[in-house]
Structures are given as structure tokens and as C-alpha cells.
Image: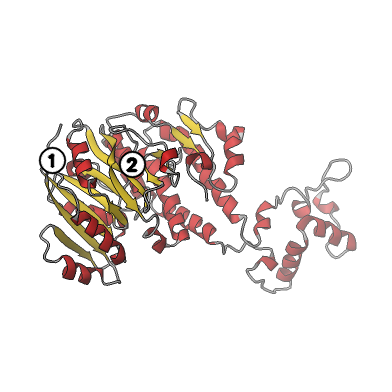
Amino acid sequence: MTPIRKVSVAVLSWNGRSHLETCLAALAGQEDPGVEWEVLVLDNGSTDGTAAWMRERWGREPRVRLVESPVNLGFCVGNNRLVAAADADAVALLNNDTRPEPGWLGSLVEALASAPADVAAVSGKIVDWAGERLDFGRGVMTFDGHAFQLDFRRPLAAARLPAAGEELPFACGGNLLVRRASFLAAGGFDESYFAYLEDVDLGWRLWSGGERIVFAPGAVAHHRSSATSDLLGLYNRGFLFERNAFLTAYKNYEPDLWERIMPAVMLTLTSRTQALLESNPGAEILRVDPYAGHVANTATNGAGNGPAPDELPPATTWEGFKIRWRGYGPRELFRRGLRKLGIGTASSSASGALQVDDERSIAQLRALHWLFGHLDAAAQARAAVQCRRQRSDRDLFERFPLYLVPTYPGDQALFASPGFQAWLPKELPIIEAKLEEIMEIG
């Protein structure tokens, strides 16, 4: 048991005044947790009058402190700032769009205070606003750095919930209590993430650093799921998911294992990018093999031999035109004809060019662009994580097997292919599951 002197409850808010009205009222109604505690609220560059309302409504409450930022720092930087400002042994991170039950804080404090010293954090249970369906009880990690909330949106009676004190691979960033010293020693949230998967990354770092995370089922918070994250926009979130998943895998896999799992990670990222690009105008040009026809004089004749360059009829003859029509296709032939005439072609699908206008595709390409531009910083972050390592990934994945879950278009065919399976390390515990087995669909 490790005594806790004081707890700071950290609440980050971006244009969430309406949520804070409910959340702070619920915090004010908390049962005595048995320790000194305070509430820190960071107004993260809001434009909805949050700061003025906080000063008017809570300015005279000694237990509530307001921290202000003129811009949106993001979930990671914002919470790191709150942890740095906290004068406490442990910090409880709570989403602003939640309603914690009266015994929430006391349950977290009791669970962490009574746990062995190597327990760095405890994770509470998150349910929907009505208290009928599960939001978060246990998370699972995929082999490529993504993660899922197991049984998300399933009725509580059917959900697979951990027992009190059961180990978890990571705690949910919206309802957890973490030892401040452990959080800071692990580096806090990776500030390059902005938001999403930062709790998965932190959990992996805490475990590899020799600490543990357990479940506190009595610490229940009701959540308006996605109420804040929807403000970011669906496709902007897609950028964060893809970028942060790769960073999580790259930084945290231990040496030797990363080099062997990396091809499968890269195949998945490349396959998903290709599948998304297929939805854009002109995507058929990506399927053209220039060496499968007359484009490169490789079309076969009846004997199975391609014509020599000097045997190809001139383009000015009818026979030459027909061969080029078959080889190039009408769009490419037309485009080449215009080019020879010195006429520029528009960048549209009519010219035979790929036109990327699908927002999912753009988000995916933005993630790749960001990663290529920040390789050195990511390598430095990886080195720092590995320097702290005290526990092997073998130990971690024996406790929490990785998942292989088809999620994107093309995933199912890719994951089932022998070529992909050959790149999965044989000793790595992996559970293959369908998305509907992981969470409630629709």
C-alpha cells in the first residue's frame, strides 16, 4: 500500500461550457474520498465564454482552480500542463463531457492507495449517459498500434468487464487516477499526438518501464460519447488515428521485435492508403500495368512474342492507331495526342489523371506526410522509451495478446493472405477477431 496525501482532478475543456456545468456539479457532489483534493480546469482556447463563466460561477470556490490557454493546446499538451500544475501525489484525469457518480473519486483513491507500489494507475469504468451501455471497461491493442474499447456500446449485462484489481494494458485517458511521479517519469502524454491513442502509448510505456495498471469498477463516470471529439471533424480525427497508431508501434516495440513486425505494419498502412485512394476519380490509372500491353511494346502476338520496336506500325497508320488504342486506352491516348499538339490537359478524371478529393484519402496522405517529416523526432522518442525499459514485450503480450481486426476496406483480404501472414512473428500472441466481435456495430 502507498499512502496518497492529495489528489488533483484534471479536467480539460475546449468549447465545452455546457458540459462543464454538469461535470463540475457532479464533482462538487462527490463523497469524501478520504484525502485532500482539488479540481483543476484548463480552458483550452475556448470561444464559448468558458473562462468568464468559470470565474463567475466557481471563482470563489477554493477547491476549484482555473488554468487558461489562449489557444487549443490539444488533449496531450493540455493534460500535461494540468499535471505539472497539480500539487498532489496523484492526478485523476476526467473528460469534461462526463458525469462522475458520487463515489467515483473515492473508488479511484481507494483502489490506487491499496494497490502494490508497482501499480502506477487505476482505470475507472465509463458508461453511456443513461448508464445502460458500456463505453470503456477494458481496451485491446492491435499489432499496428491501433486500439479498441472492448464491447463498446454493448449492454452492460452482455459486456465483458474486468474484475476489481484486474490488470489492463492501458487506462482510458478520460477516467483514470495516475501517480503523478509515474506519469512524469514516463514522459507524460506524447505531445506530438495532440489527441487519440495517447493513453495507449502511455500505458505501454508504463508497463515497459516496470509498472502496472489495474481496473477500479466502482469508479463510474457517465459519458456523452464523442461530444467533444466531434468538434474536430471526422476526417481530421482519421489523420490523428493513423499517425498516432504508427508512432505508438514504432516507439514502443522493443528492439528485434520491431524490426520483424515492421513489414506487417507497413503493409497494412500501405494497403489502407491504396484502398482509400481507389474511391477517388481517375483511380483506374493506378491499376494500369505499363508492361502488360502495347504501352511498352510488350503485348504478345499469337506466338507469345511481343513485337520489336521497329515492327510496331507507325501511329499515323490505321493499324498503328488500333494497337495504341488497345494498349493505352482511349483516355490515355487522347491525353497523349493533346500533349503532342501542345495543348495542356486539365487535372480531372476526364484526362485520365488521379484526382484526390476524398477526405478520408487526404487524411491518410496527410498522416504519411507528417510521419515522413518527423522521422528524426520519432526516432529520438523511441530511444527515450527503450532506455526506460524494464519489462519485455514478451511479458506484456503474454498478459495482453495483440489483436488482428479487419477494419478498413481491403483489410480482410490482406490479413488472410499468406504473404501478409508470413511477416507476423510466430511467437507473437495474436487474436484474430471480427469488428463485430470487438464492439457493437451500428
Q: Quadrant of residue 259?
A: top left
Q: Is residue 146 visible?
A: no
Residue 62: x %, y % from top left = 10, 60
- N-terminal of the pair, mark 1 or mark 2, is 1
Identify which residue is drawn at 80% across, 48% down. Answer: 299
Q: Is residue 404 visible?
A: yes
Residue 180: x %, y % from top left = 18, 44
Say which of 91 and 327 sits in front: 91
CA neighbours of label 1 inside 10 A, class few (<14), some (14 to 19), many (20+): some
Say which of 246 and 342 sits in front: 246
Identify which residue is drawn at 86% across, 45% down. Answer: 301
Name the side, left or right, on which 317 lies relative to 69.
Answer: right
- How is the structure coloured here? secondary structure
Amino acid type at mark 1: Ile
Query: To which residue does mark 1 refer?
Result: 4
Quarter placement of the N terminus: top left
CA neighbours of label 2 inside 10 A, class few (<14), some (14 to 19), many (20+): some
Name the side, left or right, on which 251 lies relative to 45.
Answer: right
Amino acid type at mark 2: Arg
- Count how many numbered circles sit on residues in the image: 2
304 in relation to 316, above or below: above
Say which of 62 and 25 sits in front: 25
Query: To which residue does mark 2 refer?
Result: 382
Residue 427: x %, y % from top left = 46, 25
Residue 60: x %, y % from top left = 11, 65
Say which of 406 and 317 sits in front: 406
Name the side, left or right, on which 236 lies relative to 333.
Answer: left
Name the front one of labels 1 and 2: 1
Q: Quadrant of residue 61?
A: bottom left
